[in-house]
Amino acid sequence: VDLSKNIYNNLTSNDFTFSIWYKTNDVTKGQLIFSDWETSGSDRKLYCFVRGGSQNLRLAFSDNGSTNFINSSTILNNTWYFLQIKHNSNGVQEMKLNNVSQGTYTYTNAPTLEQEIVLGIDKANNNTFPFDGELDEVSFINGQTTAQQDSDLYNNGNGTTI
């Protein structure tokens, strides 16, 4: 699924929360859930994937010539997970899984996140690492969600009702 890069234009600030429910059928193989992909090249600024064999989720950040990661706790096959990526204007990213923080990363040289959003395939690597599972309730929320909003979103199972 390709989402228009115009999605960022609809946000009124540099603070936003991306959320998605997902479940995978095979945690033993590498699979891309989403990436912010530069259509004019092969550069991914921000991407999230299931690490094959490690059975966890990895959020990757391209920053200042290197790639940095936040790794989640162990994930299981055929289990729904609520993933949130919270971005603020100071370049801080947080990954939450089922409303539990998995860690934060602060960019040294934060990229502008205004590229095409791709769900389910890795366009930067010739459409490899297809996602094997289900995605649901994809949302971009203007601003940083509060802890209470995060809890409400997770507990009601609907990523678009705040």
Image (tube, rainbow, N blue to C red):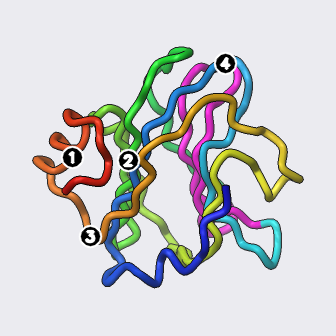
Residue 156 vs 2, above or below: the answer is above
Q: Which residue is mark 3?
A: 143
Which residue: 10% across, 47% down? 148
Q: Nearer the viewer, residue 112 or 79?
A: 79
Q: Residue 150, labelled with which disc?
A: 1
- Dot 2: within a 10 Å radius of its alpha carbon, few (fewer than 14), some, or many (20 or more) residues? many
Q: Earlier in the sequence, mark 4 or mark 3?
A: 4
Is residue 21 rendered magenta in the image?
no
In the rendered image, the quadrant that contains the C terminus is bottom left
In the rendered image, the quadrant that contains the N terminus is bottom right
In the image, what residue type sits under mark 1? Asp
| Residue contact between numbered discs 4 and 3, judged by CB atoms under 8 Å | no
Q: Which residue is mark 4?
A: 26
Q: Which residue is mark 2?
A: 84
Q: Residue 69 appears at what percent x and percent y?
A: 55, 45
| Residue contact between numbered discs 4 and 2, judged by CB atoms under 8 Å | no
Which SS class for mark 1?
Answer: helix
Magenta segment, prevailing SS (helix, strand or loop):
strand
